[in-house]
Image (spheres, helix red, strand yellow):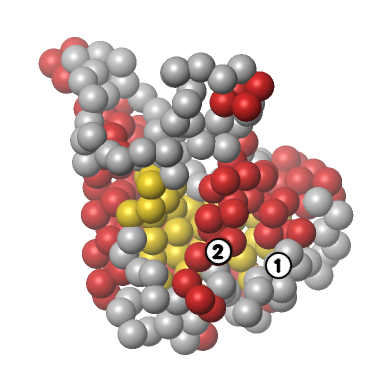
């Protein structure tokens, strides 16, 4: 079954990855809940994608706050009558210093962006998917969570915790018709440098379109047995 008519929630919809993913799923006929911080940008994205009021719900939300996350899930349910897919494309990076010189605020920021946002939003949306007996949860995670580089402790700690949340969730979802998977990338190549200016540095970067294609595949019926997977999309094995 395709995603035509499915209700797909894209958290981080106006980012360099989120906008490509939203465009891909819109092109396949999905109805979209477009989530982010700026309502104006979300509404502009819906208009750019040619989605009418029946096809899109732009919604501004603080994804790391449990109360607003639950209100968001209720709004999506009320709008569309169901929720089928939750895509967590939220995050950022902080680091660049040895652990002993790292400000505590850097760790706090990374935990909010990666861990608390994943915790709040999956708590809010997964019950909606379970109610359908069918659903998909996906997030983009870095292999740096499991194999961290130096001078990256806040980011590495947060991504490791995020990965743990989603893989534990996958075990809880066994047999429910809902799956939880993570897509591993090193760098998301929003400027298509790997294609336009190939180099040793960007050889394992991942295009947003490649991530969107992988997400689309995981939504098909044939991918229903893929659950709790760590899917590498960077052209080689982990360290």
Q: Position of residue 191 (x, y in %)?
A: 63, 26
Q: Tell me: residue 34, above or below residue 142.
A: below
Could you tell me which residue is drawn at 69 percent across and 54 percent down? 24
Q: CA distance from mark 1 to mark 2?
A: 14 Å
Q: Is residue 130 left or right of residue 50?
A: left
Answer yes or no: is residue 105 visible: no
- The answer to which image quadrant residue 14 occupies is top right
Q: Tell me: residue 165, above or below residue 175.
A: above
Q: Tell me: residue 168, above or below residue 201.
A: below
Asked whether 163 or 199 is in front, the reply is 199
Neighbourhood count class around disc 1 (C-alpha, 10 Å): few under 14, some 14–19, many 20 upward: many
Which residue in the structure is indicated by mark 1?
30
Which label is found at residue 55?
none
Could you tell me which residue is drawn at 33 percent across and 61 percent down? 229
Which label is found at residue 217?
2
Answer yes or no: is residue 28 visible: yes
Q: Is residue 208 left or right of residue 122?
A: right
Q: Position of residue 220 (x, y in %)?
A: 56, 72
Quarter of the image where the C terminus is located: top left
Badge 2 marks a residue whose secondary structure is helix
Could you tell me which residue is drawn at 44 percent across and 18 percent down? 201
Asked whether 76 or 173 is in front, the reply is 173
Q: How many marks?
A: 2
Q: Position of residue 73 (x, y in %)?
A: 54, 67
Badge 1 marks a residue whose secondary structure is loop
Could you tell me which residue is drawn at 66 percent across and 22 percent down? 196
Neighbourhood count class around disc 2 (C-alpha, 10 Å): few under 14, some 14–19, many 20 upward: some
**Disc number lying in front (1 or 2):** 2
Labels 1 & 2 near each other (Cβ < 8 A): no
Quarter of the image where the N terminus is located: bottom right
């Amino acid at each position: 079954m395709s995603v035509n008519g499915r209700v797909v929630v894209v958290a981080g919809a106006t980012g360099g990855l989120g906008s490509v993913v939203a465009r891909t799923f819109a092109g396949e006929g999905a109805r979209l809940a477009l989530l982010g911080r700026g309502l104006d940008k979300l509404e502009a994205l819906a208009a750019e994608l040619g989605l009418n009021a029946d096809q899109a719900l732009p919604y501004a939300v603080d994804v790391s706050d449990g109360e607003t996350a639950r209100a968001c899930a209720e709004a999506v349910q009320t709008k569309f009558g169901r929720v089928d897919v939750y895509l967590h494309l939220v995050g950022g990076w902080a680091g660049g210093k040895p652990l002993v010189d790292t400000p505590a605020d850097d760790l706090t920021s990374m935990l909010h962006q990666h861990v608390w946002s994943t915790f709040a939003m999956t708590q809010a949306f997964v019950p909606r998917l379970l109610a359908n007996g069918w659903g998909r949860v996906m997030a983009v995670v870095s292999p740096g969570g499991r194999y961290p580089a130096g001078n990256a402790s806040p980011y590495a700690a947060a991504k490791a915790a995020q990965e743990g949340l989603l893989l534990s969730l996958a075990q809880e979802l066994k047999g429910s018709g809902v799956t939880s998977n993570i897509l591993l990338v090193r760098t998301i190549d929003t400027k298509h440098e790997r294609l336009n200016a190939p180099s040793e540095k960007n050889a394992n970067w991942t295009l947003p379109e490649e991530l969107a294609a992988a997400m689309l595949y995981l939504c098909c019926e044939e991918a229903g047995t893929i659950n709790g997977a760590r899917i590498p999309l960077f052209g080689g094995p982990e360290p």
